[in-house]
Structure formats: structure tokens, C-alpha cells
Image: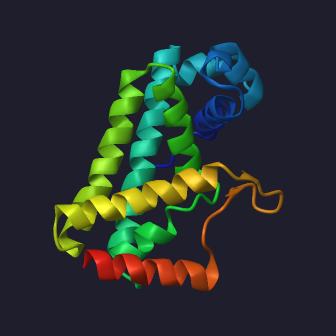
Amino acid sequence: MSRPPLARERVLDAFQAILIDDGERTATLAATAEAAGVSKGGLLYHFASRDDLVTGMLERLEALAQEDLTLMASAEEGEVAYFIRTSVMEGDDLDRALIAAARLAQAGFPTAAEMLRQVREAWAAALRPHVRDETALNLLMLVSDGLYYNNALGRVDAETGGLAGPVPTGDDMTALIELVRRATV
């Protein structure tokens, strides 16, 4: 697979950053071009409209989620443990794409809400064979949601750029994973 043009990626990065930091209304084509350091014509070369920019960002989210599913399938500690550990935001590309899509969904973009639903269902489908039943899967998904939500309540960590909030780490995270495994497998 060929790598997308650098300018296109800078535009998507800028659009995501504006969505995350300032909200959907501020994420105009002009503001995005300025933040990306490209001319409006340069932006329009890659994205003919704001809808195309939204589509490009959602396609990025879909690709990042697929990469995450691949990592989950090959995780040494297993799918359930991987899923719980990665439910804590680290400010990585997938986290940023999820937050930006959530901002769009909150602003009434049905394509963003649908993409978030598809990503969640893809994670559930990947986890389903590794838990005993649908109730166990629901518990696992809710624990993940809780970790993500609690982490979102935190502050931005200056060192990593990620969010740091009231979530278990180290031995506490390992203990949580073991508890979830006992309850779901």
C-alpha cells in the first residue's frame, strides 16, 4: 500500500487537532488550511469540500482501527488484556481519530456516529470468540468504556501529550485485567 501524500496527512492532522481542541464549528476549510500550513487551494487539491475532509478523517479512523485489530489479534497477553490496556488513552493516532470522530458525531454528523459504531462492533466481533457469552462481552465493553471515559476526565500530560486521568496503572491495571478475565472467560 502506498503512503498518502504528506500534505494530505498534514491537512487531516490539522483538521483533527481543530476538532479536538476547538470543536466542529471552528474546523473550517480556511482554519484547517492555515493550521496545516498549506494554501486553501492546496487543501482543495486533496479535499474538494468539508464533507470530503470529514470522509478522509473517518477513513483514517477506519484504517487505524483495522491496525488496532491486527495488533489485538497478535497480542502476546491475549485479546482481552490488550483491549483493556489500550482502553486507556495515550494520545496516539487512534485515540485522536476517535476523539475527533466523537466531536463530529456530537455535532450531528451521522457518518461519524456510524463509523464509531462500526469500530466498536469490530472490536466486539474480535473479542467475542475470547469471552464466554454476550453478557461477558458486554461487561468487557463497559469496562473499556469506563476506562476511556475516566481517562478523558483527566488532564493533558505534558510529557506524553496524552490524557492522564483516574485510571489504574501498573500492578493495579494487571489486577483489573485478571478480574475481568475471571469474569468474562
Snapshot quadrant of residue 117:
top left
Direction from residue 34 to residue 172 in the image, left or right = left
Quadrant, the C terminus = bottom left
Instruction: State the count of labels.
Output: 0
Q: Position of residue 32 (x, y in %)?
A: 68, 23
Q: Position of residue 85 (x, y in %)?
A: 50, 71
Q: Nearer the viewer, residue 157 or 94?
A: 157
The structure residue drawn at horizontal position 38% and vertical position 70%, both measured from the top left corner, is 72
Direction from residue 88 to residue 129 in the image, left or right = left
Q: Is residue 69 above or below residue 109?
A: below
Direction from residue 102 to residue 33 in the image, left or right = right
Q: Position of residue 174 (x, y in %)?
A: 52, 83
Q: Is residue 106 above or below residue 70?
A: above
The structure residue drawn at horizontal position 63% and vertical position 16%, both measured from the top left corner, is 25
Direction from residue 53 to residue 42 in the image, left or right = right
The structure residue drawn at horizontal position 46% and vertical position 28%, both measured from the top left corner, is 105
Q: Position of residue 128 (x, y in %)?
A: 21, 65
Q: Is residue 59 visible?
A: yes
The structure residue drawn at horizontal position 38% and vertical position 31%, both measured from the top left corner, is 113
Q: Is residue 1 visible?
A: no
Colouring: rainbow
Q: Is residue 119 above or below residue 33?
A: below
